[in-house]
Image: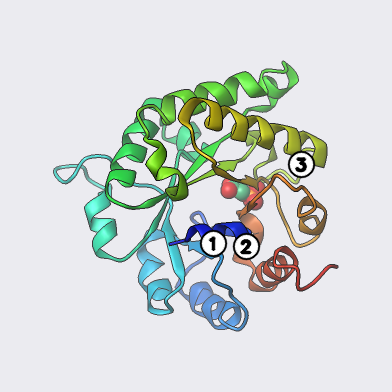
Amino acid sequence: MFSRKDYMENKIIIANMKMYMNIDDIKDYLIEVDKKITNNVILCPSNIYIPYFLEKKYKVGIQNVYFEDNGAYTGEISISQIKMMDINYVIIGHSERREYFHETDYDINKKLLKALDNNLNVILCIGETLKEKNNQETNDILRQQLEISLNNVHSNYQDHIIIAYEPRWAIGTGLVPSNLEIANTVLYIKEFVKEHYKMDIKVVYGGSVNELNVNNLNKINSVDGFMIGGACTNPDKMLKIISIVNGIDNN
Ligand code: PGA
């Protein structure tokens, strides 16, 4: 878990490994990343491979949760099951969950409240579609997502919430907003959350971040880190990203 001090001093790097990689890839990956992984990295592999990461004592996140405590919900995983495995982070509301599994902001709110009540750290994903961006609705959409998903969240939880701003059109496409666009949107998110929820929240950027563009993206002051999908599954790329974000490598 990040303390306030960790938050102030380090950028957060979240590896969203999605449904990529098989067991052989994972074993090779762990050998490679073990050399240089740092404490500000949260690795979020496929559920069945999580124990391999826990063995290494890495910070581990799960890619989704269900809001019911237990019961006949085939294929779902509850928050108490997650907690008992010593998994401390949970991604909630990823755009792929919204798009392919029809998750709504109301579902996301239920998951978020439950996770926070159970002392989990939440990575809440928000972002606009290309159509919404082109219609200049980005801030309206983000506001709506935040209003519903953070409904009834108490400001005490501020250190347990990371918001991942991930424009949907930037995920897996190689397209990335300009630094100015990201900076403005992240500031909008921070100000909105401050004003409405009295929280100083950390906001990371995600969407086609890779080892080649992260140096430039890392210059955006308001961004507190990155969420990385495709590039994180390649250990060399991931280690390069970690070094750059941590200021050890500037190329
Ligand atoms: P990407 O994915 O880096 O492959 O664009 C990011 C994400 O989905 O979190």
Which residue in the rendered view is the most extreme toward the right? 251
| Location of mark 3 (residue) | 175
Q: Residue at the spot x=64%, y=46% of the render?
A: 206
Foreground pick, 251 / 237: 251
Label 2 is placed on what type of residue? Glu
- Secondary structure of residue under mark 2: helix
Q: Residue at the spot x=54%, y=26% of the render?
A: 195
- Secondary structure of residue under mark 1: helix
Which numbered circle lies on residue 9? 2
Q: Earlier in the sequence, mark 1 or mark 3?
A: 1
Q: Earlier in the sequence, mark 3 or mark 2?
A: 2
| Location of mark 1 (residue) | 5
Label 3 is placed on what type of residue? Leu
Tags 3 and 2 touching, CB below 8 Å = no
Pointer 3: residues within 10 angstroms few (<14), some, or many (20+)? few
Whole-percent x, y for residue 171 in the image: 65, 43
Label 1 is placed on what type of residue? Lys
Q: Is residue 66 above or below residue 250?
A: above
Tags 1 and 2 touching, CB below 8 Å = yes
Residue 231 is left or right of residue 20, and the answer is: right
Residue 33 is left or right of residue 115, and the answer is: right
